[in-house]
Amino acid sequence: MDEDWKIFVAESRRYLPLLPAAPLIAMIPFALNYGYWRQENRLLTGLGISMVYAVVMPLSMWTCYGLTYAARIAIRRRTGDIIRRDLRFHALIGLVALLTGTWVSMRLISRLFNREYESGALLPSLIFGSFALAFFLLYVSYRQAKEESLRLRAETAEARYHMLENQMRPHFLFNALNSLAELIESGQPRAAEVTYKLSDLYRQILANAGGRTASLASEIEIARSYLELEQLRFGSRLRFMIQTPESAGKIHLPSLALQTLVENAVKHGIAPSLEGGEIRVEIARERPDRFSLRVSNTGAAYRPAETGTGIGLKNTVARLDLLYPGRHDFQIRTDEDGWTVASFRFTGENLA
């Protein structure tokens, strides 16, 4: 089947919910004339006439739209022009379908039920058909408004996500450069080594930042490289442990989300503490379609007023809201052992 006609079939299916309404609408005239049909002892005839309208009118509508769609395809292929299908377009096609369907229905009724064609019945049929057409146009306008709203919301969310994602990369680079500057100012002989490691790490980050999600294995590798880099700066003051689950390459989480939480733990937990501290990264499967990630650290106590103002943390929460609305349960708290714990839930699916 031609691709254009596949689109037409797909669009036609969107209006299938209207089909049950056709016999219900067609039964209204029968109900209004029930006394007459009963008096004439021709209830089946009255029902049959209603069913003729219920079958012919949708077929007329679909045929008119099919012919119009074929004309639009021919015009587009010849001239490149595209006919917009706004409400006026639907109203015009619906009116043609109404006139055609009414005329065909009355001819069929005349043949099937041995009733003389009554031109006086045309006007009431058209009036009643106009109400049915108005119902159809209201449904069409509702669908178009709903789809436009969803499209705009999706575009807005996509633009916001990319804005947040683009802010993450320079945020990490600024933090890393600050760490490098501290090493250089303190006369550390390994400053050159840190520069090379930072270059490799940023290359990994750029590779992962290309999609909404990245494999857990690659995110863990970035976090490990970053922590090893920071160990050159803090020495024995920084200790870390990363729990790597099975099939880490098949599990996906928001790109750079783990890295941001690890950075936050170093900046607010390890760096301010003279004794330093330990960072633990743990990923656990809670159920087949749900995982949890925890980044825990000792060191300086958790102070919401400080950790809650960073752009990296705010962006991480905003990105989680866009990817897992109402499901990520992000939180930062102090547990019973005095560890600061940042955690969230994710589905593990690849949303790139």
Image (cartoon, rainbow, N blue to C red):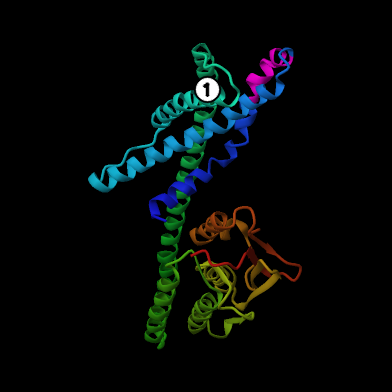
Along the line of sight, the residue nearer the viewer: 245 or 117: 117
- The residue at which mark 1 appears reads as 106
Q: Residue 44 at x, y = what percent? A: 70, 24
Figure quadrant of residue 301:
bottom right
> In this orientation, which residue lies closer to the viewer: 154 or 292?
154
Where does the image place residue 21, in percent across and percent down from the top left? 61, 32
341 with respect to 219 (left or right): right
Q: Nearer the viewer, residue 316 or 100?
A: 100
Which of the 4 image quarters holds residue 68? Answer: top left
What secondary structure is the stretch in magenta mostly built from? helix
Residue 189 sits above or below residue 166 on the image: below
Going by the image, does 43 lie left or right of 275?
right
Query: Residue 313 at what x, y percent from top left?
Result: 54, 60
In the picture, measured across the screen, residue 36 lies left or right of residue 131, that is: right
| Residue at (30, 45) in percent of width and height | 74
Give the SS element for disc 1. helix
Give amino acid for label 1. Answer: Met
Q: How many marks?
A: 1
- Furthest toward the left, the residue is 79
Q: Quadrant of the N terminus?
A: bottom left
Q: Where does the magenta region start and end?
A: 27-38
